[in-house]
Image (spheres, rainbow, N blue to C red):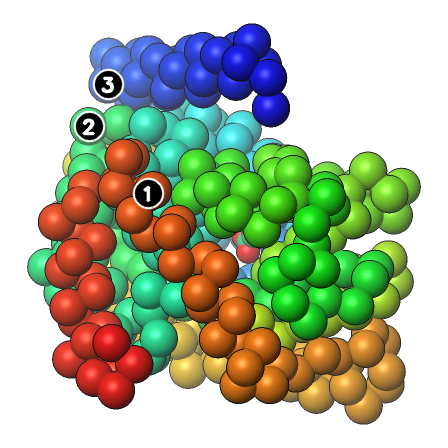
Amino acid sequence: MTFVSSRLKHSLSQFSTSLACVIACISFLAPLPALASPLVLKFSHVVAEETPKGQAALEFKRLVESRSKGKVKVEVYPESVLYKDKEELEALQLGAVHILAPSLAKFGQLGIRDFEVFDIPYLFTNPQTLSEVVNGEIGRGLLNQLGERGIKGLAFWDNGPKVISSNNPVRLPSDLKGKRFRIQPSRTLEAQVEELGATPIAMPFSEVYEALESGFVDSTENPPSNFYSRKMYKVQRYLTVTNHGHLGYAVIVNKKFWENLPRDTRELLEACLKASTVKNNEISAKMNQDAMNEIRKRKLAQVIDLTPEQLMAWKTKLQPVRRKSETWIDEDLIEKVRRTDARHSPSLK
Ligand code: SIN
């Protein structure tokens, strides 16, 4: 990347962060409409219904509507039918939509980069690390940071480990050299792809299929459930089981809207969210495994399982990303996660 384009990119990213702050201020000041009856909550997301997030959103709707006896309705809008990635965050800040569950890699767009700790390659090597981080003090600290953007963070939902898809067989990091690789808008994912010698191209999830189909990008990453439900196998021939990173979500609402709800409604929503979170985390591993089984069984893409030596080559190649990301992610936060992981996977540290 040239100096000029990198400066331009930096300015654009600063502009976009400032815009997020301006929107947050407007949403703090804007009057709230009176609560209608029934109360209708719009829940927007960008993936298919047959994904862990899609199913958990429907479970939330089912629970809320039955437990509130129809006093609260939840309208779920999947697959970006309402908004794309960045638009949905802006819409939430402005109160045009009530609930979202964006992937953790997307909060950097609001100028909150600490969520990108989940993007650091091979930092979470044990599922217990993830569970302890999101359910403990670290997770609470992250969700609290959203308050300064007019957002209330309510829960974390898991999806699963990411695999890499491509049209050339990828076994070693060098197989991605010179390729154009779609990422979510995260500086950490950008650093990861640059480390591989590929070009990171950030774009919303809703545009990925067409970008792969047209050849605008060559390769991408996602858990198998997203790859399978979005039928990316129609435009990608290989799937490499790198498990190099993690995809998860934060369930969020407009803070002012939330605080304006009657206490019993908030409590009901919280209880339903707790139950949907359990459901999400129960089904996510299975849905990813089922997707992978289908891909293998029906030979939808050629699955490449790495040998221990190849896996080590990925870990070694991506090791510098952790240090680089200390420039934009709180260093202590990274260290806390590393120590948590070391407790759960002592032999790997
Ligand atoms: C999602 O799972 O919400 C989308 C992830 C992506 O943008 O790749």
Instruction: Please tell me whether residue 277 is drawn above or below residue 193 in the rendered image.
Output: below
Q: Residues within 10 Å of mark 3 (few under 14, many from 20)?
A: many
Q: Which residue is mark 2?
A: 148
Circle 3 — which element?
A: helix
Mark 1 or mark 3: whose residue is earlier in sequence: 3
Q: Give the distance between the C-alpha atoms of the residues marked 1 and 2, in whole angstroms.
A: 22 Å
- Answer with left or right where residue 317 lies relative to residue 253: right
Instruction: Please tell me whether residue 308 is drawn above or below residue 321 in the rendered image.
Output: below
Instruction: Please tell me whether residue 147 is drawn above or below residue 179 in the rendered image.
Output: above
Q: Are marks 1 and 2 in contact (CB under 8 Å)?
A: no
Which amino acid type is shown beneath numbered disc 2? Glu
Which disc number belongs to residue 325? Answer: 1
Q: Give the distance between the C-alpha atoms of the residues marked 2 and 3, in whole angstroms.
A: 10 Å
Which amino acid type is shown beneath numbered disc 1? Ser
| Residue that appears at 15% across and 68% down | 339
Q: Nearer the viewer, mark 1 or mark 2?
A: 1
| Residue that appears at 53% across and 13% down | 3
Instruction: Please tell me whether residue 41 is drawn above or below residue 286 in the rendered image.
Output: above
Instruction: Pick whichever, 320 or 56, lies toward us.
Output: 320
Q: Nearer the viewer, mark 1 or mark 3?
A: 1
Which amino acid type is shown beneath numbered disc 3? Phe
Q: Are marks 2 and 3 in contact (CB under 8 Å)?
A: no
Circle 2 — which element?
A: helix
